[in-house]
Image: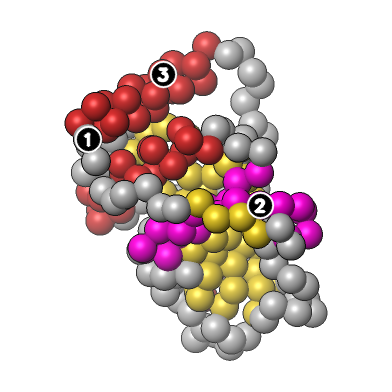
Amino acid sequence: MTLARTALTLAALLALGACDSMTGAPSPAPATEPEATPSGQDAAEAAQGGLALEGEGLRAFTAQGSARALPFGMSQDMVLNAVSTLLGTETPQVTTNSECGAGPTQFAEYPNGLQLAFQDDKFAGWFLDEASLTTADGVGVGSSRTDLQSARVVEMIPDSTLGTEFSSGDLGGMLSSEGPDAMVETLYAGLTCFFR
């Protein structure tokens, strides 16, 4: 990745943050899930810069510890540049699935199991199926059901055709079983292309 591209991406993130504070748009309603203080390890990772999963999109952390939302509705190019920079990887190829229930959807898949979904050149959703990223409160693929329920308010989705599915606010996922020792197998938010 070129230095110019990295600088442009970071400048775009900072500009986005400045826009967020000047728009005068109403603040989103408070989350229904409990706020948790990140553990020492989570805080250390955030201080080094990185990416966290959210029900409304993703959150970018700078090495200085500041955070910027990468919300659903943000431009595809801006999200791809920011995520690629934060993950330290090349921007993946974008493919199209014309058979999604919501209509033609573009996908970009990263080596760490993060798949981003876009429609009309806007960030629309994400899906994760590998233990790599977590929410700010430490929930990720590989978390135990006990840890998930300790960190968040969880509602099981009865009769899901996809498996043992749960939701937690705008965040969803699948567990390995219905048992108390189940593990989180996948997480997702926003637009998905699940065939139910």
In the visual, does 12 lie left or right of 28? left
- Mark 1 and mark 2: span between their CA atoms? 29 Å
Residue 118 is inside the magenta segment? yes
Please rate how many residues cluster around mark 3, counting C-alpha atoms within 10 Å: few if below 14, some from 14 to 19, many from 20.
few
Q: Nearer the viewer, mark 1 or mark 3?
A: 1
Q: Residue at x 66, y 73 (%)?
A: 165
User: Reading the chain from its start, which is encountered first: label 3 or label 2?
Assistant: 3
Which residue position is annotated with label 1? Answer: 2
- Mark 1 and mark 3: span between their CA atoms? 20 Å
What range is drawn magenta here? 100-119
Please rate how many residues cluster around mark 2, counting C-alpha atoms within 10 Å: few if below 14, some from 14 to 19, many from 20.
many
Q: Residue at x 54, y 60 (%)?
A: 127
Which quarter of the image is occupied by the N terminus? Answer: top left
Whether residues under marks 1 and 2 lie with C-beta atoms below 8 angstroms apart, the answer is: no
Structure colour scheme: secondary structure
Amino acid type of disc 3? Ala
Camera-nearest residue between 52 and 92:
92
In the visual, does 98 lie left or right of 90? right
- Mark 3 and mark 2: span between their CA atoms? 28 Å
Which residue position is annotated with label 3? Answer: 15
Please rate how many residues cluster around mark 1, counting C-alpha atoms within 10 Å: few if below 14, some from 14 to 19, many from 20.
few
Q: Which mark is residue 82?
A: none
* Residue 135 pos. (x, y %): 45, 54
* Residue 56 pos. (x, y %): 59, 43
Amino acid type of disc 1? Thr
